[in-house]
Amino acid sequence: MEQRLLQQIKQRYGVVGNCEQLNHALDVCLQVAHTDLSVLIIGESGVGKEILPRIIHDNSPRKRERYLAINCGSIPEGTIDSELFGHEKGAYTGAIDEGEGYFGIANKGTLFLDEVGELPLATQARLLRVLETGEYIRVGGTEVLKTDVRIVAATNVNMVKAVSEGKFRQDLYYRLNSIPVRMPALRERGNDILSLFRLFALQMVEKYKMPRLDLTEDAKRLLLKYKWPGNVRQLKNLTEQISLLSEERTITAETLRRFIPEDEETMAVASYSTKPSGESHSYEQERRLLFNFLVELQNSVQRLNGEVQELQKQITALGGQPVQMSHPVLSLPSSIPQIETPAYEMADSEEIKTESNPVVESLNVGDNEMELLKKALRRCGGNRKNAAKELGISDRTLYRRLKQLNLE
């Protein structure tokens, strides 16, 4: 392809880069555009596969007809046949009118089937018939309809593996794969990464009127070495994050490491950290917080155990039977050792010790008994019979104690 024509295509569709694989993909699309052959675009998610079908359509004899882009992975399996091929009135619940379907709407034009590898097997059989004969039947219908649609499909699935595993029809794969076009991953495009970074940064400058970004040499090397699992989409997101969140406008490798993993070879995507790379994550602070929490938990359990035992004693003193607990008295698991405060944390834990000391309560049996009876009556709405049952004592014992304590 002539360089002049290639640059015109890139400028028209906003394609940035000059790597050999990218240029080859554009060249193949332009060569096949004037035909009606099916095209299968292969590439990882986020590489920009959606640009190629548009280039094919706009440079084909069908350019004045409809162009529809359909994401097959986003349509529920139960309705995908209706979406693609249409349906008759009453074909299913909610079908109050007949629907034409994408193959009917895009007649004479181009239909881009993105994520074609996600199609159910039953739908694949219908699609194969359309590709071979141009005929299809609406859901719930019997009439054979005709359509003249150019199919361009795309997938990030390993189609050969999907065919071998029985997840994709072999005959449909060969029918779609008349002209294969591979869109390169971002990590294979070399200096295109830097060009794309500059483009996205410039877009942020123009849109939000912010200072421009500059990359140091070590930052450029880091961008080129990273594997970019999210491809162009990930690079765009990262550039936007840096533009908004970074106070430095001269971006160094140290700045970049706040946004991408420290291991440049990894395929994982890192989350952004507002801390400079020189400040490591404070595990000491997390350990301190956990220690404080366990101290408070231990003291709370001990207080609760004491209160339960005291209540049992008071009920026994009233002549009743101790209440049988549905659960044993709480205690820390035996596998958790008693917490000892490290010597260097003694000062920090003084406040915790003070707050966790049990509240000193009255040890007068009469006072505690009176308070217990009042609580039982309040809980039972003043019903003495239910209160006695709640306390585990007889009605007569409760009446006698209420009289003695002047609580009648």
Image (cartoon, grey):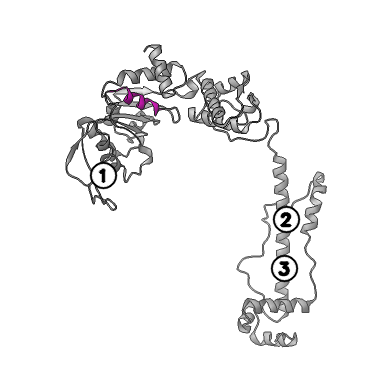
Q: Which mark is residue 296?
A: 2
Q: CA distance from mark 3 to mark 2?
A: 17 Å
Q: Is residue 277 above or below residue 408?
A: above
Q: Secondary structure at mark 3?
A: helix
Instruction: Mark 2: give few (<14), some (14-19) or many (20+) Cα within 10 Å.
Output: some
Lower sequence index among marks 1 and 2: 1
- Numbered marks: total: 3
Question: In screen coordinates, is 121 left or right of 24?
Answer: left
Which x, y percent locates residue 402?
71, 85
> Mark 1 or 2, which is nearer the eye?
1
Provide the residue designation for mark 1: 99
Real-space Cα separation, disc 1 to disc 2, in angstroms: 65 Å
**Which residue is rendered at x = 71% and y = 65% of the image?**
305
- Dot 2 falls on a residue whose secondary structure is helix
Check contact, mark 1 vs mark 2: CB within 8 A: no
Q: Is residue 145 visible?
A: yes
Q: Residues within 10 Å of mark 1 (few under 14, many from 20)?
A: some
Q: What's the amino acid at mark 3?
A: Glu
The x and y percentages for residue 323 are 65, 74
Q: Secondary structure at mark 1?
A: loop
The quadrant of the picture occupied by the N terminus is top left
Asked whether, in this view, residue 403 is left or right of residue 271, the answer is right
- Name the residue type under label 1: Gly
Report the residue marked by disc 3.
307
Q: Main secondary structure of the magenta part?
A: helix
Task: Please say if 13 is above or below 81.
Answer: above
- Taking depth in this image into account, of 149 and 315 the one nearest to the observer is 149
| Viewer-side residue, 379 vs 234 | 234
Which span of residues is magenta-colored? 49-60
Q: Nearer the viewer, mark 1 or mark 3?
A: 1
